[in-house]
Amino acid sequence: MNDEVRFLAKNLRVDQRMIAEMIAPGSRVLDIGCGDGELLDLLFRTRKCDARGIEIDMALVTRAVAHGMPVMQGDADNDLEHYPDGAFDYAVLSRTLQAVERPREVLRQMLRISARAVVSFPNFGHWFMRWQLLRTGRMPNTPAWPRPWYETPNIHPCTIRDFFALCEEESYEVEAWFALDEAGRRSPWRRSLGLANLFGEQAVLMLRKSPGGG
Amino acid sequence: MIVEASDTGLAELEHSHVRFADGLALECGITLPSLTIAYRTYGTLNPARSNAILVCHALTGDQYVAERHKLTGRPGWWELMVGPGRPVDTNRYFVICSNVLGGCMGSTGPASPRDDRPGAEGVAAEPWGTDFPLVTIRDMVRAQKKLVEHLGIERLFAVIGGSMGGMQTLEWAATYPQCVFAAVPIAAASFHSAQNIAFHEVGRQAIFADPDWLGGRYWETDRTPARGLAVARMAAHITYLSEQALTRKFGRRQRPDHDAPLDAAPLGSALFGEMFEVESYLRHQGSSFVRRFDANSYLAITRAMDYFDLAVEHEGDLSAAFAGTATRFCIVSFSSDWLFPTAQSREVARALNRVAANVSFVEIATDKGHDAFLLDEPDLHRTVAGFLTGCAEHAGLIG
């Protein structure tokens, strides 16, 4: 990470900082669920990207546009279909996949409109979640999963292993991936999916369509 | 209606203008032999001529966007948006606003003297009246393009407008994509809906029904179809508001009917002894409108709006209107606007998505209806200011 990115990203959500590092300078990026546009700002200022966003929450959209970010109100389930094939180099979906209605379709759309998809999500397979479920027999309640089951927007939680299985099924090549621990540090289990799935609090992956497949 | 025909003094005023002796060939096939465009500018054009913003006015607006109105003495119609330190900041941008083709505040329109046939020597030409050719939103934009070129500007930094001004903004981006760096259509749509055409037709029929309209030749008398035009304005004004806004402002409050409508109801009638405040408000809207607007102009411009359908201009495909565009768009709608509802703005945004255009899209939460674009809406002003500043950065206007 260069110093400029480090400086600007100080207050940025940790996965977003990591995502920014994965994106080639000067590329076209669509950030789906972009919030108030922090990542867009970072990508424009430090990487000269043509970065645009979609956000479902109108208050955040207004805040983003008022800061000069090109953001439109919309959501991953309903608005990706309106973009043409290959419109972007990267489509980013950070900590949103678990909240969409049709995650598999959203991934398909992302890899239709964009050469690469960058996805991050909280890992439901984290050891503390497993421990809570085992010990109490109730849905886990952690900083990453703070709401009770009846009012969480996270309707499609998955584990890192689950996600890899879906990529396999859909013939997506995982070009890069890593897990982050609770403190947002890049975890050392790059070589072991099992350990990452146990100790990773969230996962960040970069996908593309397998050259031979889908 | 409490309107004296003699109140109207539209013709006598001088407005700063430019006259194009080569006229304008209209979409309908008729060529206007000459074209006059009345306009105002604010701020300073930079040496690179790259900081110009064209403001497009709505149906009954005019060029007095950010200064006291020459005729009514009222503040500029968009002083909340345009001026020093405002979202469209005249300290930074050179702002142009012209009266539309077909208008009645100095630009060529139905009240202009017709010059399509030689008049008798020494006799003043009569006005076009209802013989004024059909103009379209695109004609209005082509007339504005002539003005912009006349001012020595090759590319506008931005075009912005609400309602019909938003239609013109979209038309600018579709017709002259190279000349528009950023476009801000507010409370607009890519076509005029059946419901909107229906309301316009009510207004037009009110004008036709006024005996003083005289088939459009009212200039031959000293009267104008003020009552018909006022009713048209009243009906239209309802569509600019929302039920919540009307309830909030007036509710069912009543008051004695002091300025009883001389020609609306028999005096002393038990039915009309009291009036609702909303009625009084609408009558005021109607009567003040006719002092500043020409009935034939109202007919011409409402017709131009009705015919607007950007997709039809591009074989039914709205996206095709914007294919390959590099313009940055900021589309704004209002949650309580039922005249140009958010769904229609979203349709434009999606059409732009289909050609991978750079588009921001915001729906402002407000209960003020369509007219919200003219009112004090902090979110609207923050949105426009931020969008323009972001674009200025991309355009290299600010470091």
Image (tube, coloured by chain):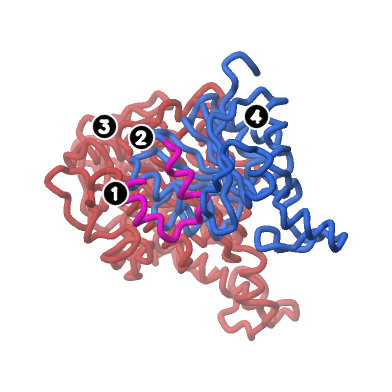
Where is mark 2, residue-wise? A26
Between the C-alphas of marks 2 and 4, the distance is: 24 Å
Q: Main secondary structure of the magenta part?
A: helix
Identify the residue at horizontal 29%, vertical 68% (top origin): B68
Looking at the rendered structure, the kind of residue marked 4 is Arg
Colour chosen for chain A: blue
Looking at the rendered structure, the kind of residue marked 3 is Gly
Q: Quadrant of residue B42?
A: bottom left
Q: Nearer the viewer, mark 2 or mark 3?
A: 2
Where is mark 1, residue-wise? B392
Between B236 and A91, which is closer to the camera in this rendering? A91
Colour chosen for chain B: red
* Quadrant of the image containing the N terminus of chain B: bottom right
Q: Nearer the viewer, mark 3 or mark 1?
A: 1
Mark 1: which secondary structure? helix
Identify the residue at horizontal 32%, vertical 45% (top origin): B158
- Number of the label disc, if any, that sits on residue B23: 3
Q: Is residue A204 left or right of residue B64?
A: right
Spot the residue most to the left.
B47
Q: Position of residue B122 (x, y in %)?
A: 18, 40
Q: Position of residue A64 (x, y in %)?
A: 46, 55
